[in-house]
Amino acid sequence: MKTRCKKARNIKLFYYVTLSCFLLILFCFSFLFTSLIKKSRDTILQGDLNYLDARVQNTEEMIYQLHQSMTQLTSSRTVLNLIYTKEKKASTMNPVMQDLSLTSQNNDLIRNAYLYFPEDNILLGSDYRLTFPQTITDMVHSYVNNHSDTVPYENGGKFSSLFLYQNQFYIARDFPLSGEHRLGILFYQINTRYLLQTLTKNLSSADQIQVFMNSDTRILSSATQESETIESSVLDQLKNEADSFCVLHKTYYFYRHSDLLDMDLIYQLPEKEVFSFSMMVGSTAVPLLLLFASVILFVYLLFISGRYLPGQLANLLQLTAENISSEAETSSPTPDTLEKLEEHIRTISSTQKNLRETVSDISPDIESKFLTRLLSGTQYSEAEALQTLSLAHSSLSLNAFYLVAVLFCDGDLTDLEQQKKSLIRDLQASMEDFCSHYHAQFRAIAVDSRTYSIILSFDISSSIIMIFKEISELEAFVITPLSEKYNCQMQFSIGRMYYSLLDISLSYQNALANKKSSQTNVAASSQTPIIKEETETITYEAADKAKEIIHLLIHNDLPGAQNLYTRSLHSIENKYPELPEMTASYHKFLKELSDNIASIDDINYADIPNELLMWNKESFTSPSEFLQQAKQNGLELLTAVNDLLKKQEHPYIASSKAIIEKNYMDPNLSLNTVAETIGINASYLSKIYKTNLNINFTDYLNRFRITKSKELLRTTTDNQQTIAEACGFNSSQNYIRVFKKITGFTPGEYRKKHR
C-alpha cells in the first residue's frame, strides 16, 4: 500500500513539473512575442528615418554638383575674358551664352542659367536672349540689392548662395570678388520638378515628402493638394521631438534637417503604411507557429504519459528491485561489442592525430606572417595579438624581453639567392643550439636574399645583465661559423631591447640604423645592447615610440598610431604605478611626441589645440583618473594631426607639388605658371596653400629649392653660382639671401658645417 502511495505521489509530482514547464514556456513565448513586435516597430521606424537621411544626402549632393558646375563655368576663359573686357560686344558675349546653354542642357537640375554684369547692367541667358521677363530682372535686382534671404554654401574655398524668389529656387555665385566690387554674378534657376522627382522616385502614392527653407517657406512638395501641406505648428513639434518623428491624426511625420543647406525635410506616411497587416503577420508568424507546436507536443506527451507512464514506472521499479544482481551479470559487454568499441576508439585517435598534424602544419605560417607584419610596423592591439598567438599555437609570450638582430650578407646576389634556403636552414639550426644553451626562444625570418632578421625572446624574469652577456656571444657562436661556411662577408647588428612583442618593429628599425652607423664608424659599441640607467632606457623607448607613432600618421595609419599610443600608456602604467613617477614619465613621452609633431613640414600648427599638450597634470588624485585623461587627450591629438596631414592630400596641392618637383630648376617657375598648368586661378591656389599648409606658395617653392641646394652643398664641390642656377635661382645673391633667411646660415657656412 505504501509503495502505491509513493508511486502516486511521484506521478503527481511529474504532472506538476510538466505543467510548470508548460507555463514557463508560455511566459517565454509571450515575452518573445512582445519583444519581436517592439523590435519590428523600431526597425521599421529607423528604416524610414534612414530613408529620409538618404534623401537629405542626395539633396546636398545635387547642390554640391551645381556648386562645382559654377566653379568650372566662372573659371572658364570665355567668361573671364568677357568680365575684364570694358566693351561688351556680341563677338565676346555669344561664346558665353553658348557656355550657359551647354551647362543648362547637360544638367537636368538646371532649368535656366543667367550671367549678370552689375557695372554694365547686362544680363545674358542660356536661351541666347538679351531681354528677359520682368520676373527674372526683378529677381536679379533683388539679389544685387541684398533683398533676398540667402543661405550661404561653401566648399573648396568657393561661396554660393541659395535663395527663393516667388516660389522659384535659385543658386547664385559672385565672382571674382564678393561685396560691392563684384564684377559678375552667375545664377542657376533650379529645376524643382526634377529635384522633386529625384527625391520621391521610390515613394508610393500615399507617401509624401515636403522641403522647407528658412524654417517656414516650403520650396518642394509631393502633396497634390494645398490642404495637405504641413502646418507650422507640426513642424515646430517635429523639431522638438527627440526621436525626430511624431504621430498626428493617424499619420507619421519623420523630420530631418540639413545644416549644410538650412533645409527641413518632412517624410509623411499614413499609419497603415508604417505598420501594415502583412508586416505584423510576418514578424509574429514564427513565434506563433512555435507556440502552437509546443502546445500540440505538450498535449501529446500528457496523453502518452497518462496512458502508459504509470504502468511503465511500476514495471521499472519492480524490475530494479528484483533483478539488480542478475542485471549486473547480464550487462557485461560481448566480445563483438568490445571489438567495435576498440575500432571506434582507433578511428577517433587517428582523426585526432591527423587534425593535430594539420594544425601543426598551418600554425608556423600564421606565426610567420604575424611576425613579418609586426616587423614592418603594423600595429595590433594586445587582444588581437593574443588571439593570433593562440590561433598559431605559438610558444611566444606577449610580454617578455624582446630584441631583433639583423644579419646582412655581402656577395654575389645570384649565389645568395641560390643559397637562401640552405642558409636559413643552417641559421635556424645554429640558433636552436644557441637558444638551448641560454634558455631563449628565437624566430628567423628572411627579409630578402641578403637580409635575415632574428627575433630573440627571453623570459621576463631573466637577469638583464645575463641577457646582455649571452647576446654578446651570439656573433661568435652563430654568425662567424656561417660566414666561414658560405664564404661571404656578413654584418651583424642588434637593436635595443623592449618589453613587448608588439614593439619588435622599433628594435628592428634600431638594428637597421646601427648597421648604417657602423658603415661610417667602425666602432662596435652599437653592435651589442649597452646597459643604461633605467631613466635613459625609458627616454629611448619614449623617443622610438613617439617617432613610430608620427611615422604611422604620415603613412595614413591612424588606427595603428592610436594602438601604439595606447600601449605606450599601458607600459608607463605598468612601470610606474605611483602618480608622481607616472606623470613624470608621461611628460617625457609627450615631449618626444611634441618634438616629432614639430618636425612635420607644411602643417598649420595653430590648428592643434594647446590644451592637448599643456594640461594641468597636478589636478589628478589617482593614477586611473590621470591615465584616462591622458588617453583621451592623446587620441584627440593624433586625430588632429591626422586631419592636418590629410589637408596635404588636396588634389591641387598634390598636382602643384609634382610640377615643382619636376621643374624647380626653371627660374621662371612661379605661382602663375603652376596655376595655369593646373588650370585654376593663381589667387585660389595661393589661398589653398595658405589654408592647408600654413605657408604661401612662394615660400614653399623657396624652401623646396633650398632643400635641393643643401644636398648639392653636402655632396658636390660646385660653387655657389652653379648650385644657385641648378636650383632655379636667378642670381647667387638672391640664393644666399633666401638660404640665410630659411636656415640662419650662408651656403658657405652650411657647407663647412656638414662636409
Image: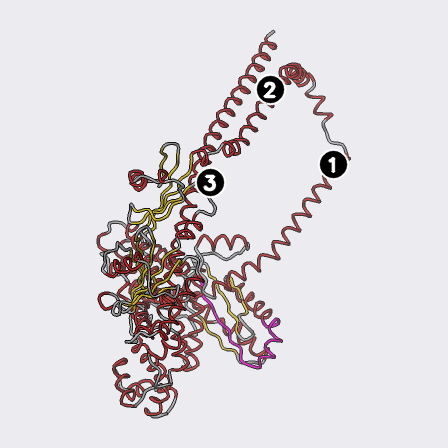
Residue bearing mark 2: 299
Q: Is any part of residue 653 visible from this angle?
A: no
Q: Residues within 10 Å of mark 3 (few under 14, many from 20)?
A: few
Identify the residue shown where x is 46% and y is 44%: 203
Q: Nearer the viewer, mark 3 or mark 1?
A: 3
First in residue order: circle 1 vs circle 2: 2
Give the vertical position of 309 relative to 426 (above or below): above
Question: In the rendering, at what x and y percent does residue 274 appear?
Answer: 45, 36
Quarter holding the N terminus?
top right
Amino acid beneath label 2: Val
Asked which secondary structure carries label 2, the reply is: helix
Amino acid beneath label 1: Leu
Question: In the rendering, at what x and y percent does residue 79 appear?
Answer: 35, 71
The residue stretch that appears in magenta: 401-423
Identify the residue shown where x is 40% and y is 82%: 663
User: What is the number of the mark on residue 205?
Assistant: 3
Amino acid beneath label 3: Ser
